[in-house]
Image: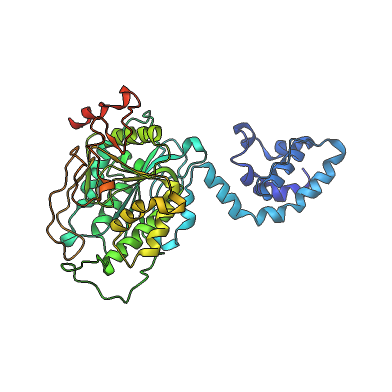
Amino acid sequence: MPSGLKSGRGALRSGLLERESTRSRHSSSSRFFANCSYAANVLLLVYLFVSNHHLLGSATVSGPQCAEAIVKLNGAMDEISNSTSLLKESMSELRGVDDMDSKLPADSKETRPAACPRCPKLPLSSKPFAAPSSSDEKTWLLLGIPTVPRRNDMDYLGETLSSLLDQLPSDPSDPLSNKVKAVVMNNKPGEHKVYEDRRRFYENGEGGVKAQHYLRFMNNPGTVPDPAPHLPDPNDLNNPTNRPGREVRKQTCDLISLMELAANTSEYYMFMEDDFHVCPHFLRATHYVIEKANLVKPNWLGIRVSYGMNGIIMRSSDLRLLASYLREHTARLPPDLLWQEWVGKAPKIPEIAGRQLLVYKHNILDHIGTVSSFKIRPNRPKWPGCYESMASVWSLIRIEQFDQYKCPNDDLSPCDNKSPGPDWVGNHVAFKGGK
C-alpha cells in the first residue's frame, strides 16, 4: 500500500463507516485499497462527503489514473480532517437524531436514553422529540405540555403523564406507535421540583420503556423575553380589559417558545396543559377527528377538543403564524384570549383567510387542577368532564363551541349537514365506556 494512503486510512474508515456494507467494513486495510478501481471509487466517496453530499455520478476509474487518484486522495486528507463536525452530523442523521437540537441553547438541553433496545448504545440525546429522516417517518402528532410548579409541589404533572401513557399504544406494531410524541417543557428551570422528579423517573427507566419511547423533557430556553417587564400588575379581581400581569405575560412567552421550537417538526400539534387527564380512547378520538376534518374541511385552521389553551389541534406548519400574533400582542391580552381573537379575525388576516376553526362535539381532556399556578384565581363554574358536551363551555366564545343546533346529526361543527358517510357518524359513542 502506498505510504500516502496509510496516513488517511483512519479518516477514511470513519467517514465511510455508515455507508459501506458489513463485508467492506470488516475487510483488512490492505485488501481495502489493493484494487486500484476500488481506491478510485473511495476517492469519489471522499469528494461526495466534503462537498456536502452532492451527487458526483457513478463513474469508475481504471489503470493509468491510479497514481493521479492517490495524489488527489492525499490532497483530500486536510479537507477530511477539517470536516469532523460534518461527519458527526451525518452519522447523527443516520441514527434518527432530532433537528430541534439546533434551536436550543446549550444550557436548556437534557438527556434521555436511546429508545431502540437493539440499536448501538449512543450518547444520551437532549432532543425533545425525534425528527424524521423521511416523510414516512415524520411524527404525526406532537403533544406540547408546558409545565410550571404549583404551591406545595402539587404533582399534577405526574397524573397528566400517567393518564397519557395509559392511552398511548404499547404494541410496537400499532400504526401510531412511532407517530406520536409528547414534549414536556419546564418553564421554571431550577424551581420545579415535580418536573425534575418526573424527568428523572421516566428518563432513568423507572417509568418503563413506553415512557422512554413517547416522552421528551426540556427546559425552556428563555429565548422569548417579556416585552413589557416594567408594567405594573393589574388587579386580577377587577380587570375589565383583561390586561395581563407579569405571570400571564410569561405564560404567553413560554407558549411562544414551545410553538417556535415545535414548528414544522410534525404533521399536527396539540396544545395541552399539565393538569388535565386524557380521556379514555383519547388517541383514537383524536385520530378520528383529524381524519374527518381532513375529509370535510381540508383547509381547516384548528380543531377544538377541549377548553383553555388545551385541546387545540393545529397543523405544525401553522404554529409560527399564531406565535407571531402572540408576540405582537403579548402585553395586551392573555394567551387564550389572543387565540380567540386570532381565530375570530381569521377572515381578515391574509395568511389564514378562508380557513375555519372546527369543534368536536365531545370534550376529550378532563381538568384535574384545583391548585392554580397563579396567586389569585376567581371562583369559576364547573368544567365539562370526559365526553361531555362542548356546546356550552362557559369560557369559550361562540365559534369555539360545538353548534348543536345547526349540526344535531354531526359531531364536528361547523357542518354542511351532508354526512360524509356512515363510517364517520356514531363511532365515537363507544369511546365513552372504559379504557
Res. 190 in view: no
The answer to whether residue 240 is left or right of residue 37 is left
Outermost right residue: 64
Quadrant, the N terminus: top right
Asked which quadrant contains residue 182, the reply is: top left
Asked which quadrant contains residue 255, the reply is: bottom left
Q: Could you say which is closer to the camera, residue 254 or residue 132?
A: 254
417 vs 230: above or below: above
Quadrant, the C terminus: top left
Q: Could you say which is closer to the camera, residue 156 or residue 60?
A: 156
Query: At which x and y percent is residue 304?
Result: 30, 44
Q: Could you say which is closer to the camera, residue 46 or residue 390?
A: 390
Please report the residue visible at 85 percent of the width from the left and 41 percent of the height from the top.
65
Outermost top residue: 422
Query: At which x and y percent is residue 151?
Result: 17, 62
Please report the residue visible at 67 percent of the width from the left and 37 percent of the height from the top.
28
What is the image's colouring? rainbow
Asked which quadrant contains residue 248, the reply is: bottom left
Query: At which x and y percent is residue 390?
Result: 22, 42
156 vs 365: above or below: below
Q: Could you say which is closer to the camera, residue 253 or residue 236?
A: 236
Res. 308 in view: yes
Query: At which x and y percent is residue 316?
Result: 42, 46
Q: How many discs appear?
A: 0
The answer to whether residue 352 is left or right of residue 251 is right
Please report the residue visible at 46 percent of the width from the left and 39 percent of the height from the top.
138
